[in-house]
Image (cartoon, rainbow, N blue to C red):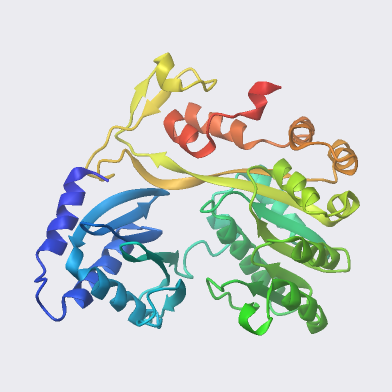
Amino acid sequence: MADALQDVLQREFTSLDVNSPNYAVAVVDRLLAQSRRLGASDAHLVPTADGLDVGFRIDGVLQAAARLPRTSAANVIARLKVLAELLTYRTDIPQEGRIRTIREQVEMRVSTFPTVFGEKAVVRLFAGSERYQRLDDLGLPEDVRGPLGRLLEETSGAILATGPAGSGKTTTIYACMRDLAFRSDGSRSLVSLEDPVEVIVPGVAQSQVNPGVQFDLLNGLRFLMRQDPEVIMVGEIRDRGTAEAAFGASLTGHLLLSTFHAGSAAEAISRLADMGIEPYLLQSGLLAILCQRLVRRLCACARPSSAVEDRLGLPVSEVRLPAGCEECNGTGYRGRFVLVEMLIPERSSVGRAILSRSDAASIERLAVQAGMVSRWQRACAAVGEGQTSAAEIRRVLGFSNPEERT
């Protein structure tokens, strides 16, 4: 965040009367308003020995915003807990709740966690239902968008969206469910099992797990199978039991959509195999695995460079560098776009590699040879076209490009 913007936010909070009985209310109101205005995905409130540090995650990067007085920290966190309907007197345990809004089309989830200096709070902001409604709104390349749309017409099999935290996996799955709801117009039974339900999707019977009463993902999925479902969305596959139940459903006449944490599409297969999922289940049950990342888009103020050191080892002849202006708040970037790869196991060479328990590197190499455009190939193309910078690609993907080792 530009120093100027940070100064503005600091002055806005400093202008409030810390001795006012409504100070905490005013701080939280302005905090949430600024989070929405800046398009932040998360707002962090971290207690320290000197104060309460406020930060916003904008376009995937956590940026310092302001520091509130140490004496106000407990009251500010308590105000957030009131809005989220949490227990204000319990400061020794983690808690999670939701801020229910009527006027704003923004879903907000509050998570608190005890630290040595008091409670830390993170507010997660979800885009309203009018954003990212359908697959066409995600900016997927046509070689992914077309096949994915056709696979959603299948009556059985599993489609997984993978990637690290914050890569847009859940957004993609929700868009798929909205597409299915729109296409079926009530003629297909669409259900979901989530932890938690993040966005309401009309046309989908959504359920939220409650481990406190033994209603976890595994038990919920087993009972859900008796509800005559045709399409099942599982918020996330986290353990072997859930994975086995999910793939079992995908082989018995159900279309399954879920998310899974993995660094690449091929790595997802290896991780599932390591969890004990039999190779024949992976080869037969999987329709496709998407792996995606969100990278920041360069602002129009970016400047070109042909210097070798600015390419950071990427195979491009020229790059653009972030400069910073008023429009991008001095960051050099405005908004994000998705880098995605889609692995289809049914392709003969890839399927044989899965059955023979090949490692992730071998599966990825065969998938690329069979036509998959990898995340690295899309990343280099995006840098070469001036959409983003080499530094941003290295920030998101790192320096361990498997294609450079083959």
Q: Position of residue 28 (x, y in %)?
A: 26, 71
Residue positioned 53% across, 56% down in the render: 137
Q: Position of residue 13 (x, y in %)?
A: 16, 63
Residue in the picture at 20% in, 50% down: 6
Which corner quadrant holds the C terminus? top right
Of the pair 13 and 118, the residue shown nearer to us? 118
The answer to which of 161 and 16 lies nearer the viewer is 16
Q: Left or right? Give the position of 292 relative to 113.
A: right
Does any portion of residue 210 appear in the rendered image? no
Viewer-closest of 294 and 278: 278
Where residue 29 appears, x then y in whole percent? 25, 73
Q: Height in image: 111 above or below 46?
A: below
Q: Residue sitting at 42 percent across and 24 percent down? A: 319
Q: Is residue 297 left or right of residue 269?
A: left
Total labels: the figure holds 0
In the image, residue 233 lies at what x, y percent?
A: 69, 68
Q: Residue furthest front?
A: 116
The picture quadrant where one finds residue 190 is bottom right
Q: Residue 236: which quarter of the image?
A: bottom right
Vertical placement of 150 versus 121: above or below?
above
Relative horizontal placement of residue 263, taking residue 80 as reference (left or right): right
Asked where in the image residue 210 lies, by quadrant, the reply is bottom right
Decide if residue 220 is on the left or right side of residue 58: right
